[in-house]
Amino acid sequence: MIYLENNQITSLPGTLFPALTRLHINNNLITALSNYILYGLYSLKELDLSNNRIVVLQDNLFSGVSALTYLDLSKNRISFLPGQTDELFEKTYPFDDLSALTYLDLSNNEIRDLPADLFDGLSALSYLDLSNNGIRDLPEDLLDGLSVLSYLDLSNNEIMGLPGNLFYRLMDLSNDNPFDRQSALTYLHLKNNKIKEIPDHVFYGLFSLIKLDLSHNEITDLSSNLFDGLPALSYLHLENNQIRVLSKYIFGRLFNLSDLILDNNRLREFQENIFTGLHRLRNLSLINNGLTAFPRDSFEELSRLEGIYLANNMLSALPVLPSSLSFLDISYNSFLDLPTGTFTNSSNLKFLNIVGNEVRVTEHIFQGLDQLLILLTDTPFMCCVKPESVDDDHCVKDLSEIEKCRYKDDLCYSDAISSCYDLIASNAQKMCLWIIGVFALIGNVFVIIYSLYIAKHATTITTFSIFVLFLSISDCLMGIYLLIIGAADVRYRGVYSWNSQAWRESQICTLAGIIFNISSEMSTFLILSITIDRAFRTVFPMSLYSRKKISRKFAFAASGVLWLMSVVIAVIPAFPSKLYFKGEFYSQSGVCFTLPLTGDKQSGSEYSFAVFVCLNSFIFIVVALGEFCMFKSVKTSAGLMTQTRQLDIYVARVLFLVVATDFCCWLPIGIMGILAKGGYTIPDDAYGWVILFVLTINSAVNPLLNTSAIVWRQLVRASSWERQRLGRTSTGHQIRTDIEMNTLRLDVKNVNCL
């Protein structure tokens, strides 16, 4: 035995040991072997020349090595084989002296054509590997005389067709007994070629064939008798072809078939009796075919079926499942409902994958699955109705999450806000929602009424007071939104998980989401408008804009444009378009809107990020610049100022506090949105509190804290001015000035209703 692998040998010496039995020269740099180089090695049984740089096999290279049983020539650069007609070579039989050869590996070379007589004389050959070459055609006589061949690999070539009698030649026709003529071939690999059509009965006579691999070809049709005469076949691979239709009873004589793989074809529907005769079938895979329906009794005869793989199709209903089933994958289909009773006959099912469907959660959806161990689902709250046999950490989106996922209390696969039983899981969040909602509604309704009362009795109505009025209306909408969510929480308390989808897809939920969006964006736009208005009056007191009185009509028109913009931003995602929003923008969460604070890819996530993070951040940057300019102007103002100038400065100071509070609410949204976009995972608790508390608190706090103070101060000052008026003589001009100052200050303080 000589082992010379993994060196840099470029050639063999002229003489070798005659008694040598094993010669391994693989992984070297040999480019050519001269004629008769192995002559005289009568005892040589194994020769490994793999992974060299051999280009040509000489005519008489293997002369004198008649005892050779193992020959590995894989991973070379062989493109020319002796036996071909060439001007420099006569036609010879390449392996004439290798009658004892049982193993021949010519894989991973550059062979294009195979001479018909290439393997003549290899009567003992049982293993032949011709994979990963560039073979285009197979001569009909290629396998003549290889009656004991059990393994044939022709995969990863460019074969376009199979001769009708190619495998018939594997039968021992010299035997008088027809029962002894059967081929010994057990494994046949033809995957990754360019085969389009297969002749009828081409495999007939391969009675010992166990595995047939025809995957990754261009097959479009299969004749009804193609698989006749294959009684021992156990594994049939037909995936990654272009098969459109399967004939009735096409598999009817494959009595021992165990695995049938038909993935990635173009099958749309199945006729009845397709699987008739497959009594021993254990695994059936039909992934990614575009299947729309099965006959109800398709699996009736498959009494031993253990695994069904139906992922990436368009199925909306299942046939009757066999009782032997233990693995079912129906992920990424079009299932909307799995009616109670679907799994009644599937008590042995251990694994179920329903990811990628929009299955409605119902209380008894998994009835009958008493032995289920793993449930894969991405449907919110589906794990809330899982069978008791499934542990919490075995109800996940992906198998890789099983070791990572640990659920707490009753939040089994819920979202950041809801649980299995309640729309709002946290009692603290429930309380905040109702308190903020009630105070936001009542407080802002009071502000609206009070503002209208002041406007009715005031001599002039400023643009500032109009903007404040609409801000109160915007905050009032936020209160309405919160009360809608609170009412839904009460309505579905204790049964939320199996009503979640119905609520999220309801028109009321969509309306609530639109109201929230309008309220939040309108508030932001109005803060920007007020800031710009006050900045010009404070920073440029002598400008034309500051001295010019803006009409009420103009203020209402500007506010109308802002309302229109807010409505458009809120309504666009509600359109039933299937291209981007898919009609799911407001139905992805129990609170009817989704902030871009998670790393999950959701419908409209880019739109949400653009509005809530990018647009609002830009607006508040402009607002911050305006506040800075006003602050600087106030600080540098002279000691003596007119009454109008004093009012503008006072408004600027009050506005700074209002903007600061709103800025503190939106700042976390911007920061968390950018972090989430960068891949950082926002904790569920933080997400829930941001939605239900941070974004909404101003709508309730502003009217509660500021409006009552305004009313009280107004009453006190009115009483004080009345006493002063009765106690001293004042000119008519002074009285009018006091009234005007009183009205302006009241309007200024109303901004805190934000």
Image (spheres, rainbow, N blue to C red):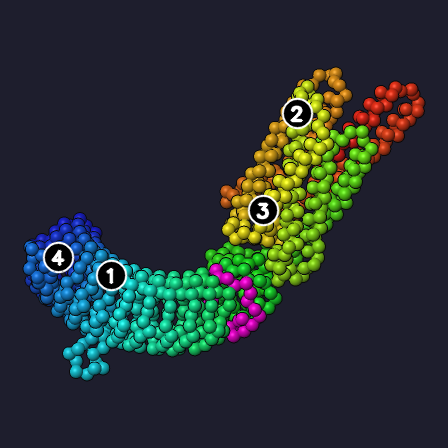
Task: Provide the major secondary structure of the magenta segment.
Answer: loop
Q: Which residue is mark 2?
A: 536
What span is in magenta? 327-348
* CB atoms of marks 3 and 4 within 8 Å: no
Count of labels in the image: 4
Residue 590, by quadrant, is bottom right
Residue lying at 68% horizontally and 27% vertically, measured from the top left: 534
Name the residue at 71% across, 33% down.
Answer: 553
Where residue 206 sits, quadrant-wise, is bottom left
* 216 up-or-down from 454: above or below: below
Query: What residue does disc 1 label?
Result: 159
Residue situated in front as seen by the camera: 613 or 201: 201
In three-dimensional space, the C-alpha distance between marks 1 and 4, rounded to whole angstroms, equals 23 Å
Residue 31 spot, x, y in % from top left: 14, 51
- Viewer-side label of 1, 3: 3
Residue 678: x and y in percent read: 50, 42
